Amino acid sequence: MLVLLPPSEGKAASGHGAPVRLESLSLPGLTDARKAVLAELVELCSGDEDKAREVLGLSEGLRGEVAKNAGLRTAGARPAGEIYTGVLYDALDLASLDAAAQRRAASSLLIFSGLWGAVRVTDRIPSYRCSMGVKLPGLGALSAHWRAPMASVLPEAAGDGPVLDLRSAAYAAAWRPKGEVAGRTATVRVLHAPTRKVVSHFNKATKGRIVRSLLADGAAPKDPAELVEALRDLGHAVEAEPPAKAGKPWTLDVLVTDVH
């Protein structure tokens, strides 16, 4: 099973170890696209700070993020699973999983990124600020920049099992599964059970808990139908809507009563 996650705006500080080595990251087919984004982001943030803040959509209070981006080539790197913080990753709490569950996380989780495209939790990266919604002056919209390389790399990464897609819309735009892969993909919405309205903050926490429970249990569903049963067995209230046509993703609604 492959699990697609969004990144987080909040990130831990970079490590004190060796800088990122693009050639060592997972999904080597994305290396050239990563080089292009990294080069332009570093150049942008090494120049006019106000222009960089405008392009990146950063407030005055986040001015320090520009300098951080300017130093990405030499900043220390640490595993992506430690870099990304925030509600989803707090709920996932990778560090507290046992060794077997952490191995499952290393092989099954894929975190999407405006800068790196997509990385595994064990890939060593520095802290950065660059969302998928950014339009760089030279490369343009990052979601469009990533579509072609993602389309060539991600189908193989998906293997032959189910794909659990927990990404937000901005990151989903960088790669939309097609054909046979789409048919075994399940996208998730988190809904408030009484009202059937989409929840926001609790949406991220619920997704983190879903992933954690699957990893801890060692669930190995072979298709979306088995994934639904696995989630129900783990105590999640799930309503499933199989696709009306072949080659379309499933829709899973996870119902919650607590939205705080």
Image (cartoon, rainbow, N blue to C red):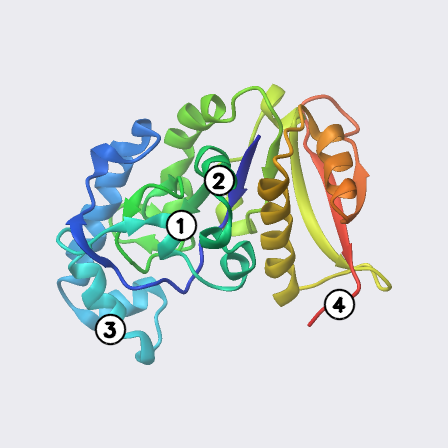
**Residue at position x 31%, y 63% in the image:** 55
Find numbered disc 3 in the image and state the secondary structure of the residue it sits on. helix
In this rendering, the answer to whether 183 lies above or below 48 is above
Residue under circle 3? 64
> Decide: marks 2, 4 in contact (CB < 8 A)?
no
Disc nearer the start of the sequence (2/3): 3
* Inter-mark Cα distance, 2 to 1: 9 Å
Residue under circle 1? 81
In this rendering, the answer to whether 104 lies above or below 257 is above
Which of discs 2 and 4 lies nearer the camera? The answer is 2
Residue under circle 4? 258
**Residue at position x 76%, y 29% in the image:** 225
> Decide: marks 2, 1 in contact (CB < 8 A)?
yes
> Decide: marks 2, 3 in contact (CB < 8 A)?
no
Please count the marks in the image: 4
Q: Nearer the viewer, residue 165 or 234?
A: 234
Which of discs 1 and 3 lies nearer the camera? The answer is 1
* Inter-mark Cα distance, 2 to 4: 27 Å
**Residue at position x 62%, y 19% in the image:** 180
**Outermost residue to the right:** 194
Circle 1: residue type:
Gly
Give neighbour class at mark 1: few <14, some 14-19, many 20+ (Cα, 10 Å). Answer: many
Disc nearer the start of the sequence (2/4): 2
